[in-house]
Image (tube, rainbow, N blue to C red):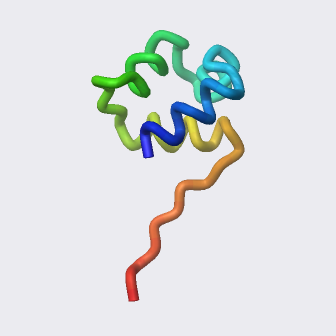
Amino acid sequence: IKHAIGIVARARGIKDTAEAAGITREALHRALGEKGNPRLSTILGVTRALGLTLKVEASA
């Protein structure tokens, strides 16, 4: 999930994505970097900023 969100964020611009998510560009780089371990709140804020929805469904 982190990797996929990172690809979209970089394609749309890290600076703009970070601003829309309410975090710094540096914090977003750290969170989505190779050794990053983003909080769920960061992932949700970034997905919201990208116009995406993260959805969890019960398995059948």
Q: Is residue 8 left or right of residue 37?
A: right
Q: Is residue 47 left or right of residue 51?
A: left
Give the image location of residue 24, x and y in percent: 53, 13
* Residue at screen point 46% across, 74% down: 57
Q: Nearer the viewer, residue 26 or 12?
A: 12
* Residue at screen point 53% across, 39% down: 5
Q: How many numbered circles are shown?
A: 0
Q: Quadrant of the C terminus?
A: bottom left
* Residue at screen point 58% across, 42% down: 47
Give the image location of residue 33, x and y in percent: 39, 22
Give the image location of residue 38, x and y in percent: 36, 33
Q: Is residue 12 left or right of residue 48?
A: right
Taking 7 as reference, is 15 above or below it?
above
Where is residue 14, by image quadrant? top right
Q: Nearer the viewer, residue 5 or 40?
A: 5
* Residue at screen point 61% across, 24% down: 10
Where is residue 53, by image quadrant? bottom right
Outermost residue, top direction? 26
Outermost residue, bottom direction? 60
